[in-house]
Image: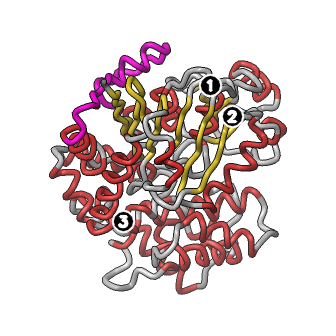
Amino acid sequence: MTTIKITSRLLDHVGSALCGMLPFEQPADAVLSRVFRDHRELGHRERGFVADTAYGVLRRKRYLEKFCGADRATPRRLLLVALVRLAHLNQRQLAEALTAKELDWVAELKALPEPELSLAEAADFPDWLTEQLLAEGRSPEEVLQLARSLNQPAPLDLRVNPMKTTREAVLERFQAEGIEARACPYAPLGLRLAQRPALAKHPLFLDGSIEVQDEGSQLLGHLVAPKRGEMVVDFCAGAGGKTLLLGALMRSTGRLYAFDVSDRRLAKLKPRLARSGLSNVHTAAIASEQDQRIKRLAGKIDRVLVDAPCSGLGTLRRNPDLKWRQTPESLAELTAKQAAILAAASRLVKVGGRLVYATCSLLDAENEAIVTDFLASHPDFVRKSCGEILASQGIALEMGESLRLLPHQHGTDGFYAAVLERQA
């Protein structure tokens, strides 16, 4: 934050972003995109400052509110507290950007002691989420450790497209270009960048050699582990990050169906697909999990991935607004939907076929509880060990029956997955 000159214009842009974000009526990234679209004059570093500062406020909202006083946590006041208490800027650095009255308040803020915080405030979680995590058996210390890792910005992870190049070749090229990168510790095709360079116009991105994808998300593809020539379904494909990985693992053979209920999300897959060099992907927008196209494929599919719609609480490093946008009521709606989607997707799986259920949630209610209930009502499915499946591919990740990834332990987003196999 301190490497850029702080001007009143720059803070106005952050304030504009926060005014759109803090009602939590739409995704924060959509608000940010609109601010940048309206102000194309902003450079790369300025956009970085606006994004980092606004997201910092969302991450630490409860902590920042303690300094604002009751009912006085306006976007502007939260922004000033973030600059002083989180970015540790002083009056001299802010002198050109603030009014005299604001500079006086900055001096007061610098002098205030750290406030006393409840567990939920220290975690910067809503009360209901803290209570849920405790109820699922986590200790207060574990909740805090998890929260602190989720309140850090995520690194930039990339996935190399093996249809186009190798990880070693990309690392060599990045090194020559001064882009600091290293191999991800677990995902065989993953790269982690030290900084966040603008890659949208990089030749390797434009020709489909690399894609942005969290390492945890990449590992889901290795749990599906599709083979050449198989019939595979990505049941909730979205914008298709995992679809592209599955297609590459299949070496563009067989048939890979990308289903989603959102035309808009699938539309984002099309340019990525064109870059990827894959010819085995068939996209289809479906009306629901009961769509006729799904019924026609019943019992014919070798492998099905269900990356279910979820609370997204495992992705708070990237989407800090989600913890304020989700509620116990929205969670109840999601768990009902997850159970219905998993049951519908299971009907596609042939005898001996594999079904992978996954979420980017931290909550057992969306994870283990869904799988346990499914197995109780589907005796023809049995669990397979995620740890053994990954180990068979040379992925050294200590996991048992389920995949449970956490940012403070694995450096990835929070993910859960279970692998189920259909028996005769």
Residues in magenta, as a range: 377-403
Of circles 2 and 1, which is in front?
2
The image quarter containing residue 375 is: top left
Q: In this view, does 404 lie to the left or right of 257?
A: left
Front-most of residues 160 and 371: 371
Residue 79, image x, y percentages: 51, 72
Q: SS class of the residue under badge 1?
A: loop
Mark 2 in CB contact with mark 1 (< 8 angstroms)? yes
Residue that numbered label 3 is attached to = 326
State whether residue 417 appears in this view.
Answer: yes
1 or 3: mark nearer the eye: 1
The amino acid at mark 3 is Gln
Residue, disc 2: 280
* Location of mark 1 (residue): 250
Residue 146 appears at what percent x and percent y? 33, 45
Give the amino acid at mark 2. Answer: Asn
How packed is label 3: few (under 14 Cα within 10 Å), some, or many (20 or more)? some
